[in-house]
Image (cartoon, grey):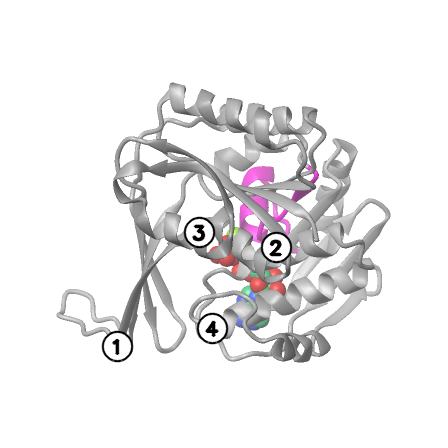
Amino acid sequence: MARILTLTLNPALDLTVQLPRLEAGQVNRSDVMHTHAAGKGVNVAQVLADLGHQLTVSGFLGEDNLQAFETLFARRGFVDAFIRVPGETRSNIKLAESDGRITDINGPGPQVSEAAQQALMDRLEQIAPGHDAVVVAGSLPLGVSAKWLQTLILRLKKLGLNVALDTSGDALREALKASPWLIKPNTEELAEVLDCEVVSVRAQAKAAERLHAQGIEHVVISHGAEGVNWFSVGSALHATPPRVSVASTVGAGDSLLAGMIHGLLSADTPEQTLRTATAIAAMAVTQIGFGIGDAAQLAQLEQGVRVRPLTEQ
Ligand SMILES: Nc1ncnc2c1ncn2[C@@H]1O[C@H](COP(=O)(O)OP(=O)(O)OP(=O)(O)O)[C@@H](O)[C@H]1O
Ligand SMILES: [Mg+2]
């Protein structure tokens, strides 16, 4: 069991609305509606907790709607190291249609002051040592710059921590310069920040080689139902997920990231690490939520994952 810190700088209350079909501009009726505390780092923490790890969660939380978060952290036994900021944590509405299509409406979230950013840096200096890895996941809130994220990663690295990063756009572009230990972009996110096509394995391998040269050890590139390419120094593997029926892809990327960190910290073989991570991500897709409810189902999904070296084209 490892001790893992996840940072969610811009968490969200997810409101999932299930409905047969969305008719824009009409009155729609929902079959099921539920709200839960979320945000990429919080999601990753939940999957890692399902895998038996000890979690500390941190980032910024709006102080006006804390309840769902505090209840979740207490229920899951997470150490709560979030900095409270004035205002409300944003809401993200997910309209989930029965054919698997999801329409997202993401709220803006609170403005995070420089004082709050400094408070988080200070808190992390105190609590981060002693963790086996830090996951920084999701977008940046209003007031927090990509440059600040880069500084944060550099600080965490100075404390001797392995930093896994999952973000996009400017935040990813700047954070890459701090050379985190692991990154998990999808193909579009990687293409955007590198400003080149990364669809072919050859292009991905070239990009990964450059990223390795600057000190990024693990480049995990996800591509939805087509699976994952994982480039680490001296080895490159591809995993194809089993075919599953899609209930909702919410949390697929977070589940993959959690699975990768689990395998790497548990010293599983690379093949086993990628197989389990891909199965956990496939499991997320089969449910409206995500997480590992059923170990037998996970074992079965693992059997359906195909892992091969990327050189064998
Ligand atoms: N339809 C699917 N069937 C099986 N596995 C899937 C499917 N969609 C996604 N996955 C698994 O989830 C992983 C992550 O998905 P994806 O590449 O869409 O991540 P993402 O774009 O980062 O998603 P997120 O919106 O969660 O951030 C994939 O690499 C794959 O292993
Ligand atoms: Mg993602």
| Lower sequence index among marks 3 and 2 | 3
| Lower sequence index among marks 1 and 2 | 1
Question: Which residue bears the numbered disc 3?
Answer: 74
| Lower sequence index among marks 2 and 4 | 2
CB within 8 Å, label 4 to label 1 = no
Q: Amino acid at mark 4?
A: Gln
CB within 8 Å, label 3 to label 4 = no
Q: Position of residue 80 (x, y in %)?
A: 47, 41
Compare residues 284 and 129 and report the one nearer the observer: 129
Question: Which residue bears the numbered disc 4?
Answer: 287
Question: Which residue bears the numbered disc 1?
Answer: 31
Between the C-alphas of marks 4 and 1, the distance is 16 Å
Residue at figure coordinates x 72%, y 61% from the top left: 274
Category of crowding for the residue at label 2, using alpha-carbon neighbours closer than 10 angstroms: few (below 14), some (14–19), many (at least 20):
many
Q: Is mark 4 within 8 Å of ligand 1?
A: no
Q: Amino acid at mark 1?
A: Asp
Segment colored magenta = 181-200
Mark 3 element type: helix
Question: Which residue bears the numbered disc 2?
Answer: 258
Quadrant in the rendering for residue 96: bottom left
Compared to residue 264, the image places residue 293 above or below, namely: below
- Please indicate whether residue 146 sits to the left or right of residue 239 in the image: left
Between the C-alphas of marks 1 and 2, the distance is 30 Å
CB within 8 Å, label 1 to label 3 = no
> Which marked residue is nearer to the observer: mark 3 or mark 4?
3
Q: Amino acid at mark 2?
A: Ala
Mark 2 element type: helix
Residue at figure coordinates x 65%, y 58% from the top left: 259
Quadrant in the rendering for residue 62: top left
